[in-house]
Amino acid sequence: MTILSDVSSLGEVAGLAGSLPVSDAEAAEAALARQNSLTKPPGALGRLEELAIFMAGWQGTERPAIASAQALVFAGNHGVCAQGVNPFPQDVTAQMVANFEQGGAAINQLCRANGADLSVIALDLDRPTADITAGPAMSEAETLDALRRGAAAVDPGVSVLILGEMGIGNSTIAAAMAMGAFGGVASHWVGKGTGSDDAGVARKIDVVTRACARHSDARGLDILARLGGREQAAICGAVLEARARGIPVILDGFICTAATVPLFAADRRFLDHCLVGHVSREPGHARLLSELGMRPILSLDMALGEGSGAAIALGVLRSALACHNGMATFAEAGVSGQ
């Protein structure tokens, strides 16, 4: 059973926010006290200290640990590709899924280097979603199905979950979802994606403008059904299941972060257990993070997707906990402190 097993509408999904676990404030305070007793000036490890305290709150212990980490990459295809927004054919989605499964992609190497078990979930690649310029991407039933599949993919026993995606055309989808939630003009949200030239970017801007005009009344999780895709819905489902299990989540770049926007739009508490691994080179990501009030762990000028930035951030998170748990206190080391 998952948190979404008995949910029959998107409205019910939106109503879950108030019933989900929250961070343990006492454990976070105890972790802060420990940080301030370690053999360093308070705050000297900067963001590493914040990450350790964040993990303490979600694990409910002064000394959190990562016993195991899961990486999920969801893949889907999009009807909006009929509008010529992508420089590569949709067959590339399935080809990249095969590459993931054979261990040949960047995410395979980064998961191996940073200690995460990778699973790739292809979502009906032979059945793209509908063209968002002509109508809703998915019905409510299709959206719920993808949400449930994302939730079911989460291993309930892991310490942390990292999320990524693959799908030709999904940078256009991400831009549309961001604009649908936060407004502005399409040029603020659209980037080159997998390598569009100036003419391709102009087509994307036109498509996102038309799609958002058609679906201008979409709110909350309706943004997911009308402007999203199966991999975006699966990411949302995984985020919800992780929350129900008290598992912290590391989101990847622009597309992965944008996938969670409908959850935030429904109730911003849905993302309280989420970190953002890095800020993407896609121009809309920094703007989106500002709207969400989220601060990325890394800035490496990456724009790959696949969960690549989140996997690298997992290594930083492991380093934060190694210092938090392994350093001596002033008393233990016999060092004079304040």
Image (spheres, rainbow, N blue to C red):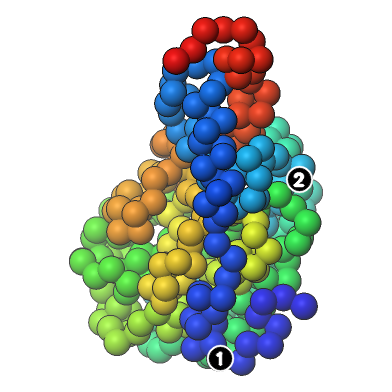
Q: Residues within 10 Å of mark 2 (few under 14, many from 20)?
A: few
Q: Is residue 232 visible?
A: yes
* Farthest top residue in view: 335
Quickly name the residue at label 2.
Answer: 68
Decide which of 236, 319 is in the foreground and name it. Answer: 319
Please identify the quadrant where the N terminus is shown: bottom right
Q: Secondary structure at mark 1?
A: loop
Is 82 positioned to the left or the right of 242 in the image?
left
Residue at 50 percent of width and 75 percent of height: 18
Residue at 49 percent of width and 26 percent of height: 36
Q: Is 99 above or below relative to 38?
A: below
Q: Secondary structure at mark 2?
A: loop
Decide which of 46, 233 is in the foreground and name it. Answer: 46
The amino acid type, in three-letter code, at marker 1 is Ser
Residue 300 coordinates in the image, percent (x, y): 44, 34
Q: Is residue 75 visible?
A: no
Residue 7 coordinates in the image, percent (x, y): 63, 87
Give the distance between the C-alpha atoms of the residues marked 1 and 2, in whole angstroms: 33 Å
Residue 176 coordinates in the image, percent (x, y): 35, 70
* Farthest left residue in view: 185
The amino acid type, in three-letter code, at marker 2 is Ser
Residue 200 coordinates in the image, percent (x, y): 33, 59
Quickly name the residue at label 1.
Answer: 9
